[in-house]
Amino acid sequence: MKKVYQLDNFRTMSDGVGRFNVQGKKFLIPEMNKIGGHLLAGVFRGFGVNSEVMTTYEGLDLGKEFTSGKECFPCIVTLGDILLYLKKEKEKLGNAFNPENYIYFMPESNGPCRFGMYNKYHRIVLDTFPDFDKVKIASLSSEDSYSADGLIPKERIQDFRKASYLSVVAGDILDRLLWKIRPYERKAGMADKFIDEAMERMTESFSRHSSKKNFSDIFTDLIEIVAEGKEIINPDIPQKPLIGMVGEIYVRSHLKSNQDTIRIFEEYGAEVINASIAEWINYTTYDLARLAKTALRLNLKGFRLKEAKESLLRYLKYNLTLFHQYRQQEKVYRMVRNHIDIEKDHKIGHLEKVLKKDNTFSFEVGTEACLSISSVMEHARAGYNGIANIFPFTCMPSNITSAIAKPLITGMNIPYIDLPYDGSFQPGREAAIRTFMYQACQRFKTYGRP
Ligand code: SF4
């Protein structure tokens, strides 16, 4: 039974969305990229939090029922996930169902696009259900580079941050391993089965070891998996055209939302590399340091010494955080690349230089367009055989990417395709991908690949 939403209930935006102690609660994580979500749940369990990745996409009809259709597609999908989960829990537990036992995780970014509004909108919808209005929404923000401050006891925050960042990097590695081995697998289905099992192994590894100071057990498990995964490659299968994928983080990572596009590309003869999740985390940290540096300069110029000191401290703090993130990421990639040649991420400072050099876009505008446009340019220079931009229909940063990158790339005669998704099936989509792949194969035959 739904209740009518009252304007004075907007108080729940502060009471029902924010940072809550998750100890003793069931912490519900929406699935974005499948592997990374499960590894993160493993980290939370390692720190004593009962966490679970919710089944995804099955509640899409519910998500559509409680949205107008104008919201970003990831907002609709994740709303459906939480509504269906709670509905099923209520049916299963009956009167024993207590909404205060659950905390739903929905992070945000501080604009300029709409990701900052998902959790507010989800709050409004949950509040219209008398059974669900006491389910709290835990939110972390790009404003402090997704610090878990307030969710995890203060004395454990640094350890948690290191472990959760490592889980993001390990998730990227397993994704990249899959995209590296599946196009060349000895027998159809081997790579998917192997990676599904690897995800379980690594989730268990993070549950058991992530709260320790030393991650050597996690590294050992990851390297074993990579070494085993490499054996799935059939060396007799010749190299294939390489496609670089950029776009909006949720839809390009969420298999159901993007209708498993990477697999379709592979069916038409491609090897694909998608942008990583760690890239976004590094970007938010980099951007905070960049903003602090600008504030420092302006405060010094205006002789506001107290504010200048605060800006300097923020600048040092975020640079130090970024330094640790890069160091951890490089360490893991170095170990993995001793076994298999998977692609590394670009440093964010390098991507900003790419934009500045070509004067194509600015980090002052913000959003994922900063990463997507610069990555497209880097892929083109590196000799990728084609580039795909995947995003929710109407996504603001991805449409900016398309408007800027597409003419530049087509001017370089590199195949490029925009793939917007909104849950519907476009009849011409596969033909468009097939045509794009024909062009990419032609380019591959003429120029080879990186
Ligand atoms: S990145 Fe795109 S899909 Fe995501 S919130 Fe912003 S506009 Fe919406």
Image: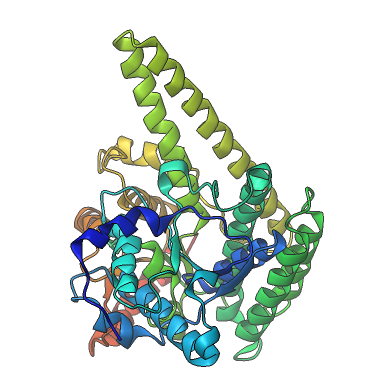
Q: Quadrant of residue 70?
A: bottom left
Q: Nearer the viewer, residue 290 or 350?
A: 290
Q: Quadrant of residue 116?
A: bottom left
Residue 261 in percent (x, y) is at: 40, 79
Q: Nearer the viewer, residue 388 or 58?
A: 58
Most extreme residue toward the front, as rendered? 95
Kindly identify the residue that appears in the image at 30 percent across and 44 percent down.
366
Residue 35 in percent (x, y) is at: 58, 71
Say whether residue 181 is visible: yes
Say whether residue 108 is visible: no
> Ligand 1 falls in which quarter?
bottom left
Residue 127 in percent (x, y) is at: 32, 70
Apparent side of residue 132 relative to residue 301 in the rendered image (left or right): right
Say above or below: 134 vs 89: above
Q: Nearer the viewer, residue 135 or 147?
A: 135
Kindly identify the residue that appears in the image at 19 percent across and 76 percent down.
69
Apparent side of residue 289 relative to residue 114 in the rendered image (left or right): right
Kindly identify the residue that appears in the image at 44 percent across and 53 percent down.
382
Say above or below: 307 vs 219: above
Q: Nearer the viewer, residue 194 or 65?
A: 65
Q: How is the image coloured?
A: rainbow
Apparent side of residue 445 relative to residue 235 in the rendered image (left or right): left
Say above or below: 162 vs 46: above
Quadrant placement of the N terminus:
bottom left
Residue 48 in percent (x, y) is at: 70, 62
Number of labels in the image equals: 0
